[in-house]
Image (tube, rainbow, N blue to C red):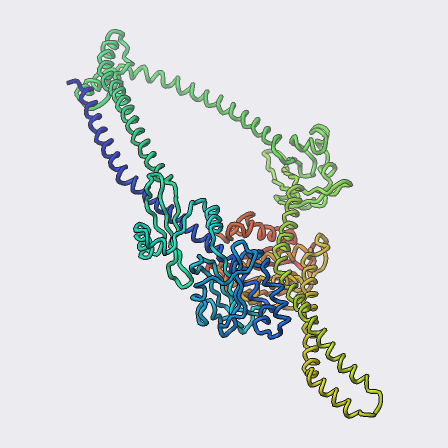
């Protein structure tokens, strides 16, 4: 058997064993991996279904909280006046309110668990219907929904009654400022209708089927799945009857953690089908490449081994016939043929050595000449490349001598001044670039000037200037000056600063509206009481005015005293004083908020002026009061510092970014310490929080544009970058100290006077 045939046979056998091993390995390992991946996908989708239902419950909770935490509801629970009770019902509990709030039942309970008011509406929310049967199983006086003594306690979730499943929320009835004590509980419920299930399907893009407990008990398969859900306490996946579908199941529990139904989702088996298709294509591809490998290997065997034997024979014959001792036979391998090749080549080497020594000297001379020519060509190429780079660079480049006379210009510089190098060579740089005259003393050394302002009759331009000293052999010292037009960048930076401040004002609008709305609502609710009190006092005064003579004076005074007693005049007068005082405080609070908003926005934001930093910080804190309420304790360590020269609107924008970031970095309760001090000709302001802190990696990138550690949708990462730019423009700097888990501190240093 020939050598080529033996090697080919061995390759084929090894390749066949590899194909079999890979095929069975793919079937057992890869297919199982795809099944596990498919199961994780199903569980993830069912978790998405669960979270969607939770969001629907949160919607009910939002409406419930808005109504329960309200002074009018707080008074309604204990109000004994039929007219005011009916006024509240007419205003807040009409059928149209149910439709607007997207709820089907509203139930009011007092602190003892007694029903104050309860109403349910039909499925189309057009008429009132009796409360569904089975509902009171969840409404025991000491039950979760009804008994709400804790101010921070609230219950939400699902309940199951014969009429169906409801999304329910219960909240303690409190004052508008969340103070108590609790006067009972307010319960909102929304029917989990087929339309609600369709809404979940639209969000999750799944086909869902709801099975209540009565449906499950009569179906063995569903009953088995129900038991598995109880045991595992998480969603499960089951392969359906159709091979291209897999079923996901989610167990729904009520507020008492009792199972009430299961949700079935039909999910296409895209992952599993893609896996089987991938395995099939992989095996097919491996088989094809194996065949190609055998063909190529056989070909290489022919080229590298068989041909060698043939070439060796031909080479020996050729050298002998031509007497060319510079020729060599190939030395390959370590067999007997290789030994013959080596001995033959040794003999040829001795004969060739003498001729090779002569040629070597000639080759060395030729190589040195080639190197010299190559160096010359590369030097010319480098000069040409450098000239092209200088002329095409997007910056103005000038070269001047020690007397500031121009010696070279690039193309952009010629275009900028409208003259060629021949026209300006030997002339002063300040004749063509007058805005550099003010920096003449700085141009003798390496320097970077970030912003040079050049104002013309039409517009204002901004340039950055960088100088590079030149030391030329045999010549006097020169200077290269690079000028870049940064006008667009400056305008973009200013626009970003404005947009960031407008965005900050927009974010504060909701909180400010809420802050203003509270005193306005108080004044509104107080007017009725004031009218009643004034009417009562007027009646008493009218009685005094009716006394015209001393006749029956005693009887008339007794009648007046009886009237005063029936009206409880002393309490009425005291109550009137308190109501007027509350109205004064509300209007003062509203005026304070509006004044702070005007201070923050800064009508003259682009004007450099003297500014009281403490007033700017305090006005910003007032605007952020709603954001801080209930979780942030502001600690002020103010010292006596002078007013500084700055742009107040922009500096307030920095304070807003510092404080907003500190609040966002403190998810739970914590402190923010604001400290000011004067140090030499500078003022130092620090903002220190007790929040989550930052890693060293995040701290290194914190001032980069668009870098943020917040969640998606909560920030663009421009606030600190813009703040850094504003402080730099004011010739100040920001220092950051932070440690993960212990909080962060931003220290701002600003000069008192701008040069």
Report the number of numbered marks: 0
What residue is rendered at 65% in x and 35% in y? 396
Judged left or right of residue 674, residue 193 is: left
Judged left or right of residue 70, residue 439 is: right
Give the residue at the far right of this rendering: 549
Foreground pick, 429 / 483? 483
What residue is rendered at 70% in x and 70% in y? 527
Judged left or right of residue 417, residue 70 is: left
Q: Which corner quadrant of the image does residue 297 belong to?
A: top left
List x then y, in percent, for residue 284: 30, 29
Foreground pick, 120 / 244? 120
Q: Which corner quadrant of the image does residue 97 belong to?
A: bottom right
**Quadrant (top left, top right, bottom left, bottom right) of the C terminus:** bottom right
With respect to residue 348, does 585 lie above or below?
below
Residue 666 visible in the current orientation: no
List x then y, in percent, for residue 662: 55, 60
Q: Which corner quadrant of the image does residue 164 belong to?
A: bottom left
**Quadrant (top left, top right, bottom left, bottom right) of the N terminus:** top left
Give the residue at the far left of this rendering: 1
What residue is rendered at 43% in x and 50% in y? 48
With respect to residue 459, does 675 lie above or below?
below
Give the residue at the far top of this rendering: 321
Foreground pick, 25 / 446? 25
Residue 393 visible in the current orientation: yes
With respect to residue 490, does 217 lie above or below?
below
List x then y, in percent, for residue 336: 17, 20
List x then y, in percent, for residue 572: 69, 80
With respect to residue 321, does 650 lie above or below?
below
Judged left or right of residue 141, residue 554 is: right
């Amino acid at each position: 058997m020939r050598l080529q045939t033996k090697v080919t046979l061995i390759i084929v056998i090894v390749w066949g064993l590899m194909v079999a091993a890979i095929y069975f390995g793919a079937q057992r390992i890869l297919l199982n991996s795809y099944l596990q991946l498919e199961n994780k996908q199903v569980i993830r989708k069912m978790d998405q279904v669960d979270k969607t239902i939770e969001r629907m419950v949160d919607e009910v909770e939002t409406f419930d909280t808005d109504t329960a935490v309200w002074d009018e509801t707080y008074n309604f629970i204990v109000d004994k006046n039929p007219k005011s009770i009916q006024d509240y019902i007419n205003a807040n509990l009409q059928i149209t309110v149910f439709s607007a709030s997207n709820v089907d039942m509203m139930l009011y309970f007092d602190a003892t668990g007694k029903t104050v008011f309860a109403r349910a509406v039909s499925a189309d929310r057009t008429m009132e219907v009796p409360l569904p049967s089975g509902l009171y199983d969840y409404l025991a006086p000491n039950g979760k929904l009804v008994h709400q003594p804790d101010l921070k306690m609230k219950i939400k979730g699902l309940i199951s009654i014969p009429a169906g499943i409801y999304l329910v929320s219960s909240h303690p009835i409190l004052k508008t400022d969340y103070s108590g004590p609790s006067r009972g509980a307010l319960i909102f419920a929304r029917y989990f209708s087929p339309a609600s299930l369709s809404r979940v399907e639209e969000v999750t893009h799944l086909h869902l089927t709801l099975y209540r407990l009565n449906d499950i008990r009569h179906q063995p398969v569903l009953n088995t799945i129900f038991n598995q859900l109880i045991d595992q306490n998480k969603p499960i996946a089951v392969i359906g009857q159709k091979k291209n579908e897999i079923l996901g199941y989610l167990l729904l529990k009520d507020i008492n953690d009792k199972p009430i139904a299961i949700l079935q989702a039909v999910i296409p088996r895209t992952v599993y089908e893609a896996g089987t298709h991938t395995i099939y294509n992989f095996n097919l591809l491996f088989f094809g490449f194996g065949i190609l490998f055998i063909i190529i290997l056989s070909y290489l065997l022919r080229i590298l081994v068989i041909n060698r034997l043939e070439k060796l024979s031909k080479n020996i014959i050729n050298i002998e016939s031509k007497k060319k001792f510079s020729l060599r036979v190939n030395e390959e391998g370590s067999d007997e043929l290789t030994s013959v090749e080596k001995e033959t080549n040794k003999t040829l080497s001795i004969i060739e050595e003498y001729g090779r020594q002569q040629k070597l000297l000639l080759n060395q001379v030729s190589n040195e000449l080639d190197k010299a020519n190559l160096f010359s060509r590369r030097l010319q190429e480098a000069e040409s490349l450098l000239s092209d780079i200088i002329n095409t660079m997007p910056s103005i480049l000038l070269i001047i001598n020690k007397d500031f006379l121009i010696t070279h210009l690039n193309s952009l510089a010629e275009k900028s001044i409208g003259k060629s190098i021949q026209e300006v060579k030997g002339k002063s740089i300040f004749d063509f670039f007058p805005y550099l005259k003010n920096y003449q003393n700085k141009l003798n050394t390496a320097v970077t000037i970030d912003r040079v302002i050049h104002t013309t009759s039409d517009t204002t331009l901004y340039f950055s200037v960088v100088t590079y000293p030149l030391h030329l052999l045999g010549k006097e010292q020169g200077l290269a000056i690079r000028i870049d037009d940064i006008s667009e960048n400056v305008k973009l930076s200013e626009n970003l600063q404005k947009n960031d401040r407008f965005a900050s004002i927009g974010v504060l609008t909701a909180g400010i509206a809420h802050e203003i709305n509270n005193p306005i609502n108080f004044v509104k609710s107080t007017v009725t009481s004031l009218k009643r009190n004034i009417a009562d006092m007027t009646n008493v005064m009218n009685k005094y005015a009716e006394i015209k003579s001393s006749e029956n004076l005693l009887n008339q005074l007794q009648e007046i005293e009886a009237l005063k007693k029936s009206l409880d005049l002393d309490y009425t007068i005291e109550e009137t004083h308190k109501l007027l005082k509350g109205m004064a405080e509300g209007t003062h609070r509203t005026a304070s908020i509006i004044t702070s908003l005007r201070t923050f926005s800064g009508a003259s934001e682009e004007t450099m002026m003297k500014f009281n930093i403490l007033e700017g910080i305090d006005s910003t804190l007032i605007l952020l009061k709603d954001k801080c309420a209930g979780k942030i304790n502001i600690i002020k360590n103010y010292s006596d510092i002078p007013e500084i020269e700055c742009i107040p609107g922009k500096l307030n924008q920095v304070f807003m970014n510092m404080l907003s970031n500190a609040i966002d970095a403190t998810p739970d309760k914590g402190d923010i310490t604001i400290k000011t001090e004067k140090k030499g000709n500078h003022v130092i302001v620090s903002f220190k929080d007790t929040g989550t802190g930052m890693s060293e990696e995040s701290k290194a990138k914190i001032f980069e544009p668009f870098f943020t550690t917040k969640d998606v949708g909560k920030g663009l990462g421009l606030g600190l970058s813009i703040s850094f730019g504003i402080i730099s423009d004011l010739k100040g700097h920001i220092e950051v100290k932070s440690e993960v888990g212990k909080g962060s501190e931003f220290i701002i240093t600003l000069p008192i006077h701008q040069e």
